[in-house]
Structures are given as structure tokens and as C-alpha cells.
Image: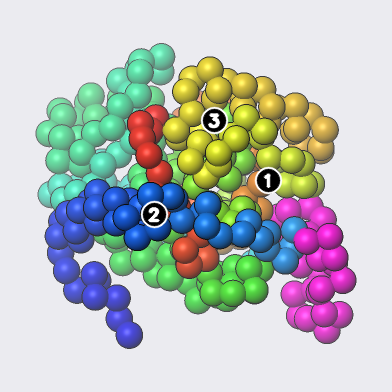
Amino acid sequence: MADPSALLPYGVVKTLARVRRSVEPALRRALGGGRPSWTREPNALPWFDQPDALARIPADDPHAALLRQWVEEGWFVVDDVVDPADVDAMVAALDGLWDAPQPVPHLELLDLRDAPDAPTRTVSHADLLAIETARRARIRACSDWRIHGFHYLNPAARRLFDSPRLMALTSRLFDCPARPFAVINFMKGSRQHLHQDMGVFHIYPWNYLIGAWIACEDIHPASGPLVFHPGSHRAPFFPGFTDYPQTNLRTADEALAAVYDRYVEAVAAAYPRREFLPRKGQVLLWHGMLVHGGAPVVMPGTSRKSMVIHYTVRGADRAKEIQGPVRW
């Protein structure tokens, strides 16, 4: 059955989602006696984090080698799971945003800056196109810009989001139906601090979270490639998030977030470091606890075009029940 929201204008969908987010936590608490849902459910880890995970992989499974690497190292790379034509169409649409004839409603570009050392800001597409041409070109050159939720607005991005081959692969990893969410398009190196996605999202039971990084061009070593630390997914979760999923990087104060950063750096130091230098169309999948981030951009202005999709399972994303304030 088609998703009914797909038949509604995006603005209506966004308003309905905002209303639902505002009332659902109170409704959940009322139905659950005032307690968050996760306090009433066991924290049963997925099969791949169980002590006997390797023994659970059938020898005749066509994905057996990938599944073993997933259990032991927390990542693997696959080819031919996304349509190159959709990647090209999506990238062309993204590149065309800077001189588009008309603004795209409800579209925002993040991390824009007027100079290399200037603070970043979020700008609507309409406001961006209203900036005079020379300044707009300067902003583009200075900014490591990104877009969230482009799949809501672009058909090619939506087809990648709905990729049946990625859905089948992540569902096989979870051993139950996977659900894509939280999509980001990066056009340059993110320079992100080392982190684990479990520290960013509110997932319960723990570790029902997979990241998929789609290379939208051949990635150059000087562009600030994705870095990750194989095996780091097996390290203990940060003990400072004592009431996770309520507290994580979004809801922690600055002091606790700084302690988390130091903890993750110490975990990373205990494992090898890898840089992801894929060809266009290759996809890296990683465990929600795998430590990863963005390498420094050695050659300013170099692009690093990618699409990141996160996957979870039904009911595991508890963000709607989280109590603020949040840092983003």
C-alpha cells in the first residue's frame, strides 16, 4: 500500500509531523503511566551483538562473508546496490541549486559561511537565490555545505532512499524489516569529530542502527574522506549517558559532550584507522557503534559528494519521546 503522506504536499506533511511530535510524547506517557516506553521493555541487543553471533551465520548464506565481517569489524562495502543514474540525477539537482531559476520550497542549506573562518549558518534556498551572484559564488566556495531530507524534495534522492537492494541488505543484517530515516547529503568533506551514531540518535533497544554511506563520485584522498575504526563497535558505550536514550549528544550539556568526545577518541586510538576512498556508487555500511568521522580537508574546494542514509527497525527510534532541551 502506498504511503498516504506521499499524496500530500510537503508543507502539509511537515506540519502534520510537527503536530504529531508535539503531542505524541504526552500521549505515550499518559498511556504508559508517565514512564518512557523504553523503561517498560527489555534491552535485547540484535543478533550480531550476541556472544554466539558468528555461530548464527549459516554457512550457505550468500552474505556469509559480509556477515562475519560485520560481526567482527562492524562494517563492509558493497557494489551495485544503487542505481548510478539516480546518483547522477540527484547530484545534478544538488549542484544546480546555486543558480536555479526558482527556489525549492521548504529546502534549507546547512553550514554556509561567507568566509573560511566565518561562523556557519542555515539558509533557505529562497534566501540563497536572493543573494547577488558574486557573493553567492563566494559562499559556495567557502562552505562545506550539506542538506538534510533531500529525498522529500527530489525524485532521484527518493529512489535511492527507497532502494530495494539496500533495504534487503539492511533487513538481512537486522534479521527483520529495516526502515530508512535521517538522510544527509554532503557535498564536501564534513570534518566531523569522531563519534558513534548511537551517540547521536535515540535508539532502544540498543544498536538497532545502521549507517549507509553512498559515494556519489570517486572520492579523492585530499577531500576529507570518511574515516572509521574497524572493531570499535565492540567497545563499551559511553558510561556518561546514564539514562540513554534520553541523554546523548543532542541532549547532553557542553561539559558532558566534551567528556564524550575524549572517550571516543580514546576508543578510536585502540583500533586501526581506515579511510574510505570509494568509487562512485560504492556503499559503506557501518554498525551504529562504529567510531567514525571526517578527515581534514587537505585540498580546500575539493568536493566529497555523498548521501548518508540511516536505518533502524520499527519502534526503535525513540526521538519522539525525548525531553528537551536539545542542542540541535
CA–CA distance in space, label 2 to label 3: 43 Å
- The magenta segment is 50-77
Near-viewer residue (135 or 51): 51
Asked whether the residues under the numbered discs 1 and 3 touch, taking CB atoms below 8 Å apart as contact, a structural biologist would say no
Q: In the rendered structure, which disc, 2 or 3, sits on the residue that comes first in sequence?
A: 2
Whether residue 151 is visible here, answered yes or no, is no
Could you tell me which residue is drawn at 74 percent across and 40 percent down?
236
Q: Earlier in the sequence, mark 2 or mark 1?
A: 2
Instruction: Find the distance from the CA under tag 2 to the CA under tag 1.
Output: 35 Å
Secondary element at image label 1: loop
User: Foreground: 170 or 85?
Assistant: 170
Q: Identity of the amino acid at label 1?
A: Leu
Going from the N terminus, do you reach mark 1 or mark 3 first?
Answer: 3
71 inside magenta stretch: yes
> Can you give x and y, in whole percent of width and height, for residue 164 in the image?
50, 76
Q: Residue at x 61, y 41 (%)?
A: 196
Residue position marked by numbered label 1 in the rendering: 290
On the image, the x and y values in percent for residue 150 come to 33, 54
Count of picture labels? 3
Question: Colour mode?
Answer: rainbow
